[in-house]
Image (spheres, rainbow, N blue to C red):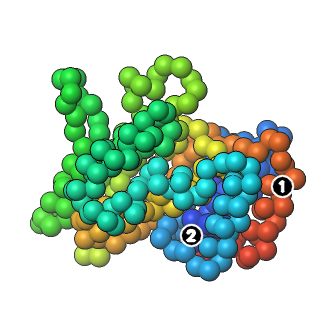
Amino acid sequence: MYLPMKTRPSCASAWLAAVTAVNAANGNHDAQNVIVDVADPLVMSDTDREVVALVDQYLRDHGKYPVETVANTIFPRSLYARHKAPAFYDVYREKVLPRIKKNDWGRYFDRMITFPLEKKGKSINPLDDMVTKMRTHVGAKRCFRNIYEITIYDPIRDAGPPMNRQCLSFLSFKLTDGPNRKLLLTAVYRNHYYVERLLGNLIGLGRLMKFVADEVNVAVGSLTIVSTHAEVDCPSDRDGLNELLAEARATGNLKEVA
């Protein structure tokens, strides 16, 4: 059982198509194995910005995290802009992480840069290790294109009580062949709230892709998300959601990639 979306040109248009489809899938407003594909996750037209603003206002009106906050859980763009790599890893650990350490949500970037080893107090930085390896291979005569992966799911932390655990489980990066290489990303979610999280997730993953691509000197390609369970999460305000979707569709932002 799966629900594939046709490729959309941007994060905002992909969000609108996915929410519309899952909302209509059944009486529970959910679906299994939804595949969302974005041709260029960095595109942000005036129409896209209008959709983002509509979603952001809806989330704020309902006491939810704004789109930018959700995006920052995956990649802290402003922190990177100020400090660059590798310095921003330590700044994140020392200054950002202590403020959000009380809960596991919002710490996806922490999981990407800190994976504890068996030896107490020791860890590795999977994101930095991956970037270093990819940079080396891109510049070599033989380029390995399909070996770059980061596991977000932690069997020690996440196999316990079912609530308040990570939803993003796995990141698989790929490089296209040929002289003008592009970076591709497939992200797997075990559970996905499409109103509260999907748009911010798409934007944050696009920013993560740009970071990796810039660090290894390749272009950004497509982003694919596989939501093994997707839910249109607004049980108390279906009318408000329908109004939001109608306003978003009125922007004309439901185009497919030709």
As drawn, the label of residue 48 is none
Picture coordinates of residue 137, whole percent (x, y): 17, 60
From the viewer's perspective, tell me whether residue 204 is left or right of residue 15: left
Q: Dot 1 lies on which element?
A: helix
Answer with the quarter of the image where residue 151 lies. top left
- Give the foreground label among 2 and 1: 1
The residue under the point 24% across, 43% down is 125
How many residues crowd mark 1 within 10 Å: few (<14), some (14–19), many (20+)? few
Question: Which quadrant is the N terminus positioned in?
Answer: top right
From the viewer's perspective, tell me whether residue 152 is left or right of residue 190: left
As drawn, the label of residue 10 is 2
The residue under the point 48% across, 43% down is 106
As drawn, the label of residue 240 is 1
**Residue 233 shows in this picture:** yes
From the viewer's perspective, tell me whether residue 109 is left or right of residue 29: left
The residue under the point 83% across, 55% down is 240
